[in-house]
Image (spheres, rainbow, N blue to C red):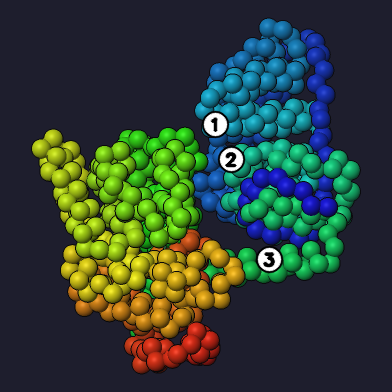
Amino acid sequence: MKIYGVGAAEGIGIGVAKVVREQSVEVIKKNIPDIETEVKNFMEILEITKAETEEMSQTLEKNASAKEAEILFGHIMLMSDPMLVDEIVNRIKNDMVCAEYAIDEVCNQYAAAFASMDDELMQQRATDMHDIKLRLIKKILGIESTDLSKLPYGSILVAKDLTPSMTAGLNPENVLGIVTEFGGKTSHSAILARALEIPAVVGLSDLPDDIKDDTDILIDGENGEVIILPNEEEKAEYEKKRNEFASNKELLKKYRELSSISKDGKRVEIAGNIGSPEDVNKVIENGGEGIGLFRTEFLFMDRDSMPSEEEQFESYKKVAVAMDGKPVIIRTLDIGGDKEIPYMGIQKDENPFLGYRAIRLCLDRKEDIYIPQLRALLRASAFGNIKIMLPLITSMDEIREAKALIETIKAEFDSKNIAYNKYIEVGIMIETAAASLLADIFAKEVDFFSIGTNDLIQYTMSVDRGNVKIAGLYSPFSPAVLRSIHRIITEGKKAGIMVGMCGEAAADPLLIPVLLSWGMDEFSMSASSILKSRQIISLCDSEALRTKVDKVLELATESEITNYLKKLTEEL
Ligand code: PEP
Ligand code: MG
């Protein structure tokens, strides 16, 4: 049985269920004649609980990091809040009630106040408050909390919900997964699960009530999948996924902090492709050295009207700031072709890929589309290392017209004292046969090239990139495509400009050694491919490979080339 929830901590968990049933505590209002002793007891229990939390946070600091330990410091702070403590004490004294009742009443009031706030962080405090309340009451009533630190190896913890203190006490060596009915991605328990690297799926509204201890369970904490009582095929699939995840994690440890340097010391840049500012985190997590392609069309999609200059400015600025001075190549709007935007009122072309799209459309719609975007880009350039990239270039006129527009905006900004980077680089995508053939001329006019193989292949081979019937013809290893790529890199380097690639082929393990040997400077790809590609680069001696790699330019067929490169890369 497969059910879906929210993937809260990535990783694959394979194990058996250990079900933690909620221990509800019943609080009865009891009248207490000796309030002094009751208050003294409460204060003692409060101090013991604070000391235990302190201990837990130290363990957590060891198992995770200081940042996560702060969540438990937050609990100590709450327990040390004089207002909260006074209110509980006053309640005991004034109403002459037992401590557990006073704690329950006061903490519930605080939790309700936190829960009603708009701020997500404050709402989180409500869960923290409940966590504290339960621990204090259980201690007063002498109820033992289930000791989750003793769960045996291979446990998948199944619970309605987990409190931060329960999660923090888990032993990540033994607990291989967490499954809960409630909770979200940003809850403190989810944050702790991620910090402890325990795969977790939360918010499983379909979680059956009757799962028994020791039932086989598989979980995929990235995709939010849980399989209860899996069959052999599912088990094998998850084992494969788990091994892949583990080897990727090893790569992560080894290559994340490293630069991208070949065996013979040649340094290149591996950057990430993104479609929104939110994607930047994944690039940073995977050790990306920049953004090689920000596809801005995604800011224009799934909405009813164009994003304003201001909105665009905020998005571009966010990426520039997050990348903290590292290069951020932002491509101007590339719509048309396979990417449609209904509110723009663009008529459907008979041959959309050869039609009214990208730079062609933008230069035709300067006032309402292109100028606002270029203004937003220039303004955002004051906040980081933004570079502007023009898509689908086929002629020098397009480059000059776009650059002239940029210059006009710069002049206006100068006169109005609007900040921007005066030296902002302007580059082009080389993704048409025309641009490849004119690479030598274009290289004199622009600051960088980025090879868009996704389109370059389709325009070189006359093969629709989305048509499965002719997919066999669509390959970066077609001799014509490889010659084109070689030409673009050579001409770009001859002119002394940076040459990168942001099409899918940039992460192809067979192609990377070739591109490196030909002198390509920047490889831009989806975040998940960055570390593997960095590893391949570290294994290549680009100089020693050079003559061997050049042989591909003499080969006549795609299969000859791929077979040749397979052998070559096996020897790395
Ligand atoms: C390309 O064509 O290679 C490219 C990166 O652009 P897109 O895939 O957005 O067309
Ligand atoms: Mg393209």
Residue under label 2: 186
Q: In the figure, is residue 553 to the left or right of 468?
A: left
Residue 168, given in percent of the width and then of the height, sits at 65, 46
What's the residue at 60%, 51% (across, down)?
194
Q: Which amino acid does label 2 sit on?
A: Thr
| Secondary structure state at the residue bearing disc 1 | helix
Q: What residue is disc 3 on?
A: 241
Going by the numbered disc 3, the residue's amino acid type is Lys
Frontmost residue, 266 versus 351:
351
Q: Which residue lies furthest to the top in this view?
A: 94
Q: Which residue is drawn at 68% across and 50% down?
A: 224
**Spot occupied by residue 86 in the image (x, y as percentages of width and height):** 59, 16
State the residue position of label 1. Answer: 120
> Residue 47: in sight, yes or no?
no
Q: Which of marks 1 and 3 is nearer the N terminus?
A: 1
- Distance from disc 1 to disc 3, alpha carbons, whole Å, reads 33 Å
